Amino acid sequence: MRKTIKALALLCMVVTMTLQVGAASIDKGFTNIIESFQGDIKFNDFNIGFQGDSILINQQVFVPIRELAILFEAKNILWEEETQSVTITTKDAVIIIANESNEILVNGETEVINQSVSIINGTMYVPIRAFSKLLGAEEIEWDNMTRTVLITKPNLVVKERFLLQRSAEVIEEAKEEPKEEPAIKVAKSYSDEDLYWLSRIIEAESRGEPYQGKLAVANVVINRKKSSLFPNNIKDVIFDRQYGVQFTPAYNGMIYNNPGEESIKAAIEALEGNNNIGNALYFVPTSARGSWVATNRTYHTQISGHAFYL
C-alpha cells in the first residue's frame, strides 16, 4: 500500500513538473498568428488599398509602414539597414521604429504600443490603429459588422493610387478642389543615402547649435558637393581626406550616432534647396580663429558657435 502511495505521489510530481515546464515553454516560444485580412479599409469614406497585403497579426490589422506613411503625406521615409529601423518625418514629428519592437520614438519621447512591428518578406508591417494616430488621424474606428477599418483625417485628399474605386463625382470633386503638392514627390532630388549621411554629420558637427546653425552646416556639405574642388556626392564629401580629414566626426565614430529631429529636418530642407549660408564651403568653431581656414579663406558670417567662410 505504501509503495502504491509513493508511486502515485511520484507520478503527481512528474505530471506537475511537466505542466510547469510546458507552460513556460509555450510562454517563451510564443508565435504570432498571421492571417490574411478579409475586410476593408476606408480613409475619409473612400475604400483604399495598399501595395502589399493588409494582414492580421494576433487579430490586429497590420499594413506596410511605407504605404501608410505615404497615404498620410509624410515628408520622408528612411530605412536604416544597420539598425533595422524606419525613420518617418512628418510636418509635426519625427517617428523612429525598429523591427520587432513595440517602443516608438516620437520627437525624442518613447511611446509604447500593444504589439511589436514585424518585417515579413522584406516589408515592415505596423498596427494600423496605433500608427494612423501617430501620423495624424483624427479618428480611427472598427466596424465589426462590415469588418472595416474607418480612418478619418479631414482636408487630406486621398491619392489616386490608393483608391479601389472612383466615381465620376469623386473625379469632378478632385478637379475642383485646389490641392497642395504631395509631401513625398515621386522624383525627389536626393536619395535616402544622402539624407542618412547628411543628417548624421549635422548632428555630429552642430549638436547643441540652433536650427539655423544646423541648416548652415548642411549647406556647407551640399555646396562642397556642387564645387569642383570636392567630391560630387554627399557621403564622399563627408569622408573626403584628399587634403587631410575634412570632417573629424567621420573618423572618430561620431558620424554613426543617430540624428535628432532638428538634424533630420535641416538635412531635408537643405537637400530640397533651402540655403541660408550662400556659397560658404567651410566652417570652424568661433574659438578656432587662428586655423588654416580662418587665415586663408574669406570670412562670410557667424551663426552661434560656428564661423563660416567662402
Image (cartoon, rainbow, N blue to C red):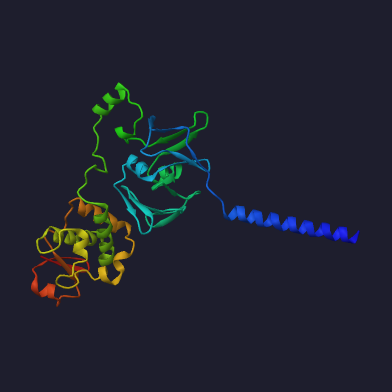
Residue 154 image position (x, y, % from top left)? 35, 35
Residue reaching furthest to the top: 168
Q: Is residue 31 left or right of residue 175?
A: right
Which residue lies at the image location 78% right of the left edge and 56% below the top edge?
Answer: 12
Residue 268 image position (x, y, % from top left)? 24, 53
Residue 158: tell me if it is visible: no
Locate the N terminus by quadrant. bottom right
Residue 216 image position (x, y, % from top left)? 19, 60
Residue 23 image position (x, y, % from top left)? 65, 53
Front residue (pair 182, 57): 57
Front residue (pair 305, 262): 262
Residue 23: tell me if it is visible: yes
Q: Quadrant of residue 213?
A: bottom left
Where is 290 relative to 225, above or below?
below
Locate the C terminus by quadrant. bottom left
Which residue lies at the image location 68% right of the left edge and 56% below the top edge?
Answer: 20
Q: Quadrant of residue 281?
A: bottom left
Q: Is residue 159 left or right of residue 99?
A: left
Q: Is residue 60 left or right of residue 19?
A: left
